[in-house]
Amino acid sequence: MTPRSGVLMPLYIYPVKGAWDPLFEAIQTHPSLDFTVVVNPASGPGASPLPDANYTREITRLNTYPNVKTIGYVPLDYGKRALEKAYADIAHYADWKSKNPNLAMQGIFLDESPQLADDHNTTFLADVKTRIKATTGLASGAIVMNPGSIPDSRILGTTDRTVVFEEQYQTYINRQAAKALAALPDRDVLCALMHSIPTEMPIAQLKTVVNELRELAGSLFLTDLSTDYYQQFSPRFQEYIDAML
């Protein structure tokens, strides 16, 4: 039986009214898919105590769906960012709930997380994980980290889920990435983000690619866009979502 998959949606699109409609359509028409939506107002939570009216409207709407989990974006600069700044972002997202329960984040997306398991990086990630899990206001306290590729094994199991592939389609083919991903344990905690899929790829071939990825990673994001692929929706966005079923 083909394993169940979820969608990891890095959503860096400013939510003017209607801008997120393709996502809402996908959520509503695919109730069997779990959507983890990364909320990123300003490469983090932004300076204001709460997000603006547009974010407030759309996050509130996202949080009404049982198949959606919203998580806040926190960059780590591959372990070079000061812990205090990362902690401040985490606390800021958590504080949204105390000011407006409709804006509650259910976890944190750690972008640019370290790949190498040296003493600094392993301690850094352990400290960040401990802080997130201990922070009131983050619901389940889910943590997704994104080193962009397969990290050292000591890092791979640090958080709840890990992005082990964030590359274009042709890189996936050229590097025979499927073999490396197949060697990893527990697909359910792995995420794959693929961009620059050929725009002319037939539906049948697309489904073959998706089915292969579903065997390798529990959460996927796919697009044919090659630039700004987290800032806009592909014209084929619904086709990619359909292919995950």
Image: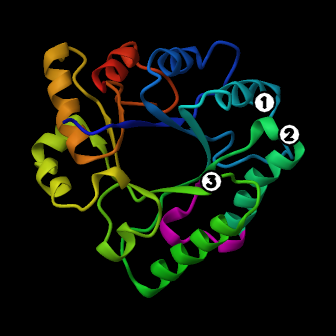
User: Disc 3 or 1, which lies upstream in sequence?
Assistant: 1
- Seen at 53% across and 17% down, the residue is 28
Label 3's element?
loop
- The residue closer to the viewer here, 13 or 129, is 129
Does the image show residue 137? yes
Mark 3 nearby-residue class (10 Å; few <14, some 14–19, many ≥20): few
Q: CA distance from mark 1 to mark 2?
A: 9 Å
Compare marks 1 and 2 and give the one earlier in the sequence: 1
Which mark lies nearer to you, 2 or 3? 3
| Badge 2 vs badge 3, beta-carbon distance below 8 Å | no
In the image, is residue 99 part of the stretch drawn in magenta?
no
- Looking at numbered disc 2 in the image, what kind of residue is underneath it? Asn
On the image, which quarter does residue 229 sit in? Answer: top left
Identify residue type, mark 3: Ser
Rounded to the nearest whole Å, what is the CA distance between mark 3 and mark 1?
20 Å
SS for callout 2 = loop
Q: Identify which residue, 81 or 192, lies in the foreground.
A: 192
Where does the magenta region start and end? 74-84
Circle 1 sits on which residue?
56
Dot 2 alpha-carbon crowd within 10 angstroms: few under 14, some 14 to 19, many 20 or more: few
Residue 92: give x, y in percent of width and height: 78, 54
Which residue sits at x=15%, y=48%? 178
Residue tagged by mark 2?
100
Local packing at callout 1 (Cα closer than 10 Å; few below 14, some 14-19, many 20+) is some
Q: Position of residue 218 (x, y in %)?
A: 33, 45
Residue highlighted by disc 3? 140
How far is the residue under mark 2 from the one under mark 3?
17 Å
